[in-house]
Structures are given as C-alpha cells and as structure tokens.
Image (spheres, rainbow, N blue to C red):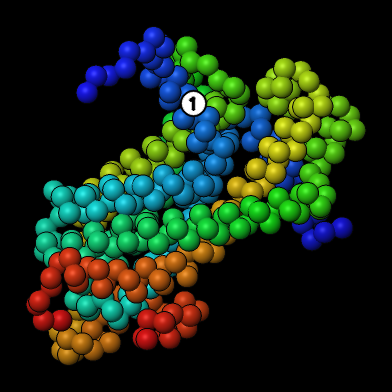
Amino acid sequence: MIKPITTATPIKLNQRMANSLEKFSEQGGEKIANYINAAGKFAIAPLMILYNPFTKEPKENKKWAAVKQPVEAVVTIAAQIMSLNLLYKGIDKLAEKGKLNFKLVQDAEKSGKIPEAILKANSGDKVKALKTLQKTCLDIFKDRTGTILTIALYVPILAVSNRIFPVIADLLTKDNDDE
Amino acid sequence: MSKITPITQSKLFNNHLKRVINDDAFAARTIVVCSVLKDVFAYSVRYKTTMENKKIPEKRRPFVAAMDLASGVVTSVAQIAVGFSIASPKVQNKLWNKIFGNAQFKNIGVAKKSFATILALIGSGLITERVLVPLMATPLAAFVEKKFFKHDATAPATSAKTYSNYPFHKPTVFKKMFKSKTNA
C-alpha cells in the first residue's frame, strides 16, 4: 500500500506532550491523582510484589498479594470516577443557582484586585479574569470535596474488592493446597 | 444562605484558594498531601478488612495484611518526601525548561500548575509508592508478620484464635460494619 505524501510539518514531540498536558489538566487534580494511583496499582504494584528480590515468601503468597492490586485498581477507579462525576455535576448545579459564592471572587469583584496569576493568564482583561477566578475557585473546591468523597468511598470499595479478589486469586493461582 | 456558605466564605478556605492560585508548588504539594491522606485511610481500613476477610485462607491472611500495614507506614513518609521535592520550584523550572522550553500553550499558567501536580504525583504515587515502597515493604512485611503475628500452635488451623493477637485489632466500628458482609 502506497502511503500518501503529506507536506505538513510533523508536530514536535514536546508540542504533542504540551497538548496532552493541557487536555489532561482539564480533568482536575483529584481525578488526575486517582488515574495515576490506579495506573500504578494496576500495572506496577503486582510486578513489584511478584519479582521483589528481597522477599523469601512462598510464591503462592506473593501471587495472592499481587492479584489483589489490579482487582482493587479496576474496582476503585470505576467507582471513584462515577461518583466524582456525580459530585461535580451537583457542585456545578449549585454554582449555577448562585449558591457557591467564594469570598475571594466577591472581594475581587468589589475591589478589582485579582490574583496576578489569573490576570496574567487573561492578558489583563479583568472581566475574563473574574470568570477564570470563579472557575478556578470552583475547580479547587471540587478537588477538595472530591478528596473527602474518595476517602469516604474507600470503605465500600474495599468491601467489594475484598469479596472479588480471593475468587480471582484462586482462579489464577490454582491453589490446591490445604487451608 | 446555603449550608456551604460558611466554607466558601471562611477566611481559612479563601486563603487556601489564594495560595493554590498563586503558588504552583503549594498546589502540587496539596494534591500530594491529599493523596497521602487517602493512602493512610485506605491502608488502615484495608488492614482491618483483610484480617477479617474469611474468604482469604487463614494461612495467607497474615502476609496479605502485613503487606498492607508495612506499605501504609513506609508509603506515607516516602511519598511526602519525594512529592514535595519534585514540586519545589527549582526542580520544576529545570524540568519545564528541558521538556517544554519551546512548546506553545493556550494557558501556560494552568499548564505549569498541572505539570507540577502531575510530576509530583508520578514521583510520589507511581515511582515511590509502587516501586520503591514495595521493595522496602515486602521484607518489612515478613518482619512484621514474624514479630507481631504470633501463631498459636495449639489452636486448630481454622480457629479464630489462631491469629487473635495481631496488632490494632479490637472489635471496632469497622468490624461491626463488615461483619455481615465478610461472613456472607
């Protein structure tokens, strides 16, 4: 198959990374933290338990501990993202109704003093900067409440994954020895 | 006046907002601390539920639980140390210039803040928690299991007394919460 000839300059790797960074950052700190945590738990943690050179634990014990990690990662991230989406929607609704008024934004509206980082990002446009400030405050509020929700969710999530993982561990390790 | 107003109007929370907006390193450190808080809570709950989970064979339970306990302690300290170091402005500036020196951004301020947060989380939550900590925690778990989980040789293998003296185990609210679920 002949490849079509393109004249467009290929996007540099760092520009691609820059674009991905901007897209990923739209997710918000709490979700990003959860994604990174789940990725590590799913892909790296089992390998580290299985191939840790320092342990002399029986292989079957290590397999059991290793299987727990990806099962927990999948259950956790699914529950976290679903519930965070619900929480964020609720917060957005409250904000639309005007029930979330941050003192920082109100003060900025009154005094015209907007944090420099926000003003700079909006090229000095105060109207745009105030909107960005409101959105930034809302995003930070979402992140903090999201953390509280994530902590609260650990109890039911662990109960679910603790029920699922021994079944999967049994299937994978084919543990036939006496218990 | 909604129930959330005391929070959104509080001096403490608004000072926090101001600092997160103006200081990228502080924003990244806050996310690292939140992540560590989740781990502290998660590991304590996990330890308890593992020891009370009768679906895990009793002879496997102490090692799985000891892994949770040892990982929890080591991971919290190590994550904060690594996350805070990566979030420092010196490290951030060096890495940013190296990776994104000539890249174009729609909003460079937001990108820089996200970069600091993501990098601090990768350093603390991926490399430290998932690679460095297990290397330290696995031998530590074996040590904890030997030192604190005294196996009662006279008790039958399936007896609840077998591992009755493991640390921090008291009939708490967790036990009550999970009793019906884990025994089901």
Q: Is residue B120 visible?
A: yes
Tell me which amino acid carries mark 1: Asn
Residue shown at 53% from the left, 29% from the top? A22
Looking at the picture, how far across and down is residue B125, in whole percent? Answer: 40, 44
Judge from the rendering whether residue B26 lies leftward or rightward of residue A50; answer left or right: right
Residue shown at 18% from the left, 61% from the top? A62
Front-most of residues B150 and A119: A119
Among the 4 quarters of the image, the one containing residue B162: bottom left
Vertical placement of A49 versus B97: above or below? below
Query: What chain does badge 1 belong to?
Result: A
Judge from the rendering whether residue A117 lies leftward or rightward of residue A131; answer left or right: left
Vertical placement of A58 versus B13: above or below? below
Q: Is residue B99 visible?
A: no
Front-most of residues B141 and A120: A120
Vertical placement of B106 versus A147: above or below? above
Front-most of residues A171 and B132: A171
Q: How many marks?
A: 1
Quadrant into which the N terminus of chain A falls: top left
Looking at the picture, how far across and down is residue B183, in whole percent? Answer: 36, 86
Residue shown at 76% from the left, 33% from the top? A131
Judge from the rendering whether residue B177 lies leftward or rightward of residue B155; answer left or right: right
Looking at the picture, how far across and down is residue A4, in whole percent? Answer: 32, 17
Q: Tell me if mark 1 has few (under 14), some (14-19) or many (20+) residues whose alpha carbon lies within 10 angstroms of its own.
A: some
Residue most extreme to the left: A177
Among the 4 quarters of the image, the one containing residue A78: bottom left
Residue most extreme to the front: A1
Quadrant into which the C terminus of chain A falls: bottom left
Q: Secondary structure at mark 1?
A: helix
Looking at the picture, how far across and down is residue A67, in whole percent? Answer: 25, 61
Residue shown at 44% from the left, 55% from the top? A77
Identify the residue position indicated by label 1 in the image.
A19
